[in-house]
Image (cartoon, grey):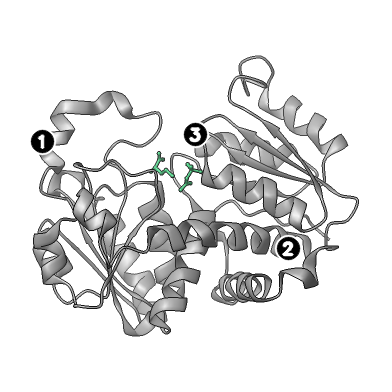
Amino acid sequence: MAKKDFLSLKNLTKHQLLDIINIAQEVKAHPQDFIQFFSGKHVGLLFQKPSLRTKTSFYLGAQQLGAASIYYGPQEVRLGQREEIRDVSRTLSQYLDIAVLRTFSHQDILEFAKFSSIPIVNGLTDLFHPSQIIADILTVTELKKDIKKIKFTYIGEINNVCNSLINAFSLLGGNLSIATPEQFYPSQETIKKIKAKFAETGGTFNISSSPEDAARGADALYTDVWFSMGKEGQTKHKEKIFKNFQINDKILEKAKNNSIVMHCLPAHRGQEITDAVFEGDNSVVFLQAANRLHAAKAILIFIWEK
Ligand code: CP
Ligand code: NVA
């Protein structure tokens, strides 16, 4: 049987995505039932960028499932610099049972996965952040029940987090509205393809350059940083373009009274979100952070199950 990687949500079927969410719910409700799951196994974390939540969730999550964890920080392995990706991949396959990677380029994780004989988990790349979105779907499901019956709005840059949200909502048949500056829209062809994918599952996809329109009547508002890791250099010019794409009181007023405000974190208060909204009653950002642990455990279990 071929190894099962977790590289992007777009590689999953709807059934597989729901399966991971179910496992996460089960692991969260009954953690004791899973403490032997990876007994005697070894999970390695190889990260090219900093991390608080993803590192802790997979490191601790693996241990809570009975495995031993090992972490390689950005300066240790220097993937592709000190040693070729394919050589690191084949070497680690000799010691580990699963590897979680955080790379700059998505191409690098694909290359790594191609040469590894063990399952590889995406802990964030420039293109996708699928483990984050498992935690987010878990959070939304806990708070809003049926994801298909809500309006979910993302305001900000179409980045790795947003790409994975698009993948998840298109698989699940959700209603996703995105507000981003027009010059940062995907191509018309890509938008057409995304819409077609949503239509297949009965969902809807909207993109606009008006955060107010996108937020109107929303059940959930989500944002992420304007400058992702590795892209911090794009500063002032981009800051000007994105300054209206902020979740603030004015935007929150447009959403439903009981709407939830989400952020994958780390947050930059005063840029994509105001301090008042971040700290306000609608904010569920630390429930999202808590759910990262259960999501990480679910992903590890999912890829291990035949
Ligand atoms: N949300 C998230 O992935 O956080 P870290 O970068 O701290 O892991
Ligand atoms: N888009 C952000 C997410 C951080 C968890 C980044 O890539 O830096």
Name the front one of labels 3 and 1. 1
Identify residue for label 1: 240
Badge 1: how crowded within 10 Å, few (<14), some, or many (20+)? few
- Sequence order check: which comes first, mark 3 or mark 1? 3
The image quadrant of residue 150 is bottom left
Kindly report the distance in space between the C-alpha atoms of the residues bearing marks 1 and 2.
43 Å
Ligand 2 sits in which quadrant?
top left
Badge 2: how crowded within 10 Å, few (<14), some, or many (20+)? many
Q: How many labels sit on residues?
A: 3
Residue beneath the point at 88% across and 56% down: 39
Does 172 sit left or right of 88 as displayed? left
Kindly report the distance in space between the C-alpha atoms of the residues bearing marks 3 and 1.
26 Å
Does 69 sit left or right of 270 as displayed? right
Kindly report the distance in space between the C-alpha atoms of the residues bearing marks 3 and 2.
26 Å
Q: Residue furthest top?
A: 82
Identify residue for label 2: 301
- Sequence order check: which comes first, mark 3 or mark 2? 3
Image quarter in which the N terminus is found: bottom right
Q: Give the answer, above or below, for where 144 lies relative to 94.
A: below
Residue beneath the point at 40% across and 70% down: 170
Disc assigned to residue 105: 3
Does 64 sit left or right of 94 as displayed? left
- Sequence order check: which comes first, mark 1 or mark 2? 1
Badge 3: how crowded within 10 Å, few (<14), some, or many (20+)? some
User: Where is residue 28 drawn, in percent x and y?
Assistant: 63, 70
Going by the numbered disc 1, the residue's amino acid type is: Lys
